[in-house]
Amino acid sequence: MSKISILNSVFSEIEKLDSAEEYKRIIKLVEKHIPQFPEELSLVQSKVVCLIHLNQIEDAYNYILKNEASQKFTFEKAYCLYRLNRPEESLELINEEPNPAHSFKELKAQILYKLERYNECFDMYRDIIKQSKDSFANERESNLTAVISQLSKLGDNKYDIPTVKQHNTYEFMYNVACVLIERREIEKAQELLDQAAKSCRNTLEEEEATEEEIQEELTAIKVQGAYCLQKLGREKEAQAEYTDVLKYKPNDIGSLAIASNNLVVLNREHNVFDSKKKLKSTLSDELTHKLNTWQLKRIMLNHCRFALITNQLDQCTQLCNNIENKYPDLIEDIILLKAVMLWRQNKNSEAIDLLKKFIYKQENPTAKLNCTLVAVKLLLLQNNSNEAITLLENLGEFKYKLGIVSTLVTLYLNVDNFKAASDLFNDTLSWYSQKEVDNSKITILLKQLAKLHLREQDPKEAAKRLTRLLELNPNNKKFLAQLIIAYTQFDPEKAQMYSKQLPPLDLQDTDIDLLENTNWMMGSKLIKKSTLKPDFAGSKTEVEKKRKKKRKIILPKNFNPDVPPNPERWLPRHERTGYRKKKDRRSKETGIGKGTQGASNVSSEQFNIKNIAAQPKPQTAQVPSENAPRLQHRKGGQYKKKKKGK
């Protein structure tokens, strides 16, 4: 046979084996014919592809390096580097390609996702979807949705949530659910994850997959569903789902680590040993390639928090230092953890100094907000209101948040600085007027400012604020009533004018006499109970008759009207002059019978072993007193012997 015919027969055999996924037999066949056809690079390429299919990536990469002199094999080499968790080298290799093919673009998009360069990855996938027309459209849509999910996690919500259709795969549904989670639509995400789980099971059952393979594929969907339950406050159900995932021990170590971490969060300070065991499973080096940076950061911080909860302060300090060196952007969380550690050691001043040092170094108000609030709490525990006020005033625009405004006003009034509280309200009102169209927050501020002026006996300023409140809420009769009350204190004419806007009183069915005679000090609830309901109440004459009806006086049987009654009849018996106390049968000397069974008033010194030797021995044996609790019911001191039967 000629070389060409031999090669043709080899390639036809490779094609048959490839359709049967017999990659090991292909490698044997290729190795047999490579010495015969050293110039035929397709045989070398076939072996590389088979090694990749067999997940022998390291062997495939080494084989490429061995044969690199004859041909570069750029795509295969880049793919091997990507699979060997060397994405930077792989991307560099692809970028060197002058005219990259479509397959290079697909690989580059995956590498960009691995490197967490999501904006570039999104643009790449969008271009690929536009240019390609093949059977892999669903996979590309799923990957694009995964990119949108990660962008949403980083706060970039400019992209629309993809629409789920009937023909979409369960992977696509899962990724859309992830997007919904990041957009805070947890309930919708939960429903979609349930659909994805059903679709996954149906698809794999059609492909005749085993139950183990189905459970393996369902792992990520179950973990994400449990996370949704956790966010919805259904913690017991979430705990059961996480436990169910861990029971199957799937090969997906990323999902296992997330389930273990979230279970520790649910356990809190309970089940410490179980939590410690689960946290150990999240320390694997392989996780750095399976989880993204955000997930790794949260797991490491949870290790620190767990060490803090269990009072392992040295370990917590060491972990904090490691995180600070590895992830400098987590400095705020580290400072908070260190401050809590110092506070637990009763070093409040050191904790406050640490927080203040960080706060004054930071220029970004967002980065220092949490540390400021913790420092304020510690300062207030030391009754240091002035320093707490200074820190809150240093928050920039964050000091105009309603919670911060409320705290500052309370602190100002605590130090009798009414002017500062009023100025803060006015500054906040002007800030919200410029920033927001919604009047809800302005209404809250005006209402509280009016209350403050009324409290400080300044009805004129209160009337100004209430007038503006009424302009914003013209149908609110409560604000109108408050405005009338304010005007009555300094301008009765205006109060009279505004009172005309009050709704008329409907007094047709009101009992005026009942209202006048009601004791309002009882409280509104008791008054409502005491008033008669119109359905069951009778006529006025019947009610009056019932009230006038007097109770008949009942006299004692031996009553004599000629004998005056005993003036001490209302006193208790033991306080009357003729009362004689009964003698107590129990002995006062021994005190036996008083208190609990077996108790005695005799001094414990009597029974001290050191004093027994010095005491004279009694001539007769001690016998329990007849007044002892166990013998009080007995008349005789001895039992009669029973006669034996004949």
Image (tube, rainbow, N blue to C red):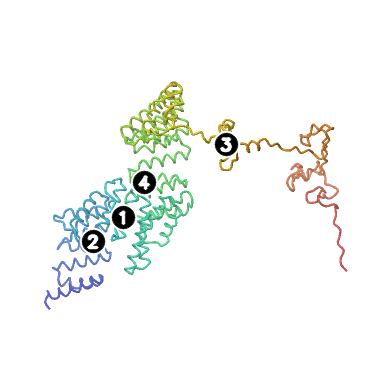
Label 2 neighbourhood size at 10 Å, few (<14), some (14-19), many (20+)?
few
- Classify residue 78 as left or right of residue 361: left
Q: What residue does disc 1 label? A: 175
Q: What residue does disc 2 label? A: 136
Residue at figure coordinates x 74%, y 38% from the top left: 552
Kindly identify the amino acid type of the residue bearing the numbered disc 3. Ile
Q: Earlier in the sequence, mark 2 or mark 4?
A: 2
Q: Is residue 551 above or below residue 296?
A: above
The image's mark for residue 322 is 4
Q: Earlier in the sequence, mark 3 or mark 4?
A: 4
**Secondary structure of the residue carrying numbered label 4:** helix
Kindly identify the amino acid type of the residue bearing the numbered disc 1. Asn
Kindly identify the amino acid type of the residue bearing the numbered disc 2. Phe
Label 3 neighbourhood size at 10 Å, few (<14), some (14-19), many (20+)?
some
**Secondary structure of the residue carrying numbered label 3:** helix
Mark in the foreground, 2 or 3: 3
Q: Is residue 612 above or below residue 468?
A: below
